Amino acid sequence: MARQGIKFEGTVTEALPGGFFLVNLDSGREVRVRASGRMQGGGGSRRIKIVPGDRVEVSFSPYDLINGQITFRYAGQRKPAVEEEIVAEEKAEAEEESSADKAEEAEKKPSSEET
């Protein structure tokens, strides 16, 4: 008897701890999945990296339609909007850190009015 599975396509929305991902399927459902096989990797050169925004194919067991496995990542089909959001968040974090550093430096400098 051959392995049978139900396959859907979707977009990775969030990376969760423990190698799990939230995937928004094209049907509108959001499911928790894990990477399968060599996608989990062992640190080798053939490891497939999955990041939020990637288009993936998800396979489910006919008995459990909630937890699935990512069986394929479509190369070069990352959603640009998600990629832009990630870049914008990184820039915002960098600006917050630099403004916090400037504020700390301003507090450390003694003012000439106090003397």
Image (cartoon, rainbow, N blue to C red):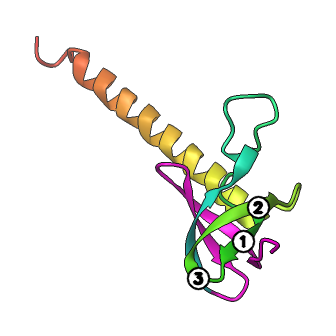
The residues bearing labels 1 and 3 have C-alpha atoms spaced at a distance of 12 Å
Which label sits on residue 78? none
Q: Badge 3 local density, few (<14 within 10 Å), some, or many (20+)?
A: few
Work out whether 53 lies above or below 63.
above
Tag 1–tag 2 contact (CB < 8 Å): yes
Tag 1–tag 3 contact (CB < 8 Å): no
Magenta stretch: give its range: 1-28
Give the left or right position of residue 104, taking residue 19 as reference: left
SS assignment at label 1: strand
Residue 5 on the magenta span: yes
SS assignment at label 3: loop
Q: Residue at x 52, y 38 (%)?
A: 94
Q: Position of residue 22 (x, y in %)?
A: 56, 66
Front one among 73 and 3: 3
Which label sits on residue 71? 2
Q: Amino acid at mark 1?
A: Ser
Q: Residue at x 74, y 44 (%)?
A: 38
Which label sits on residue 63? 3
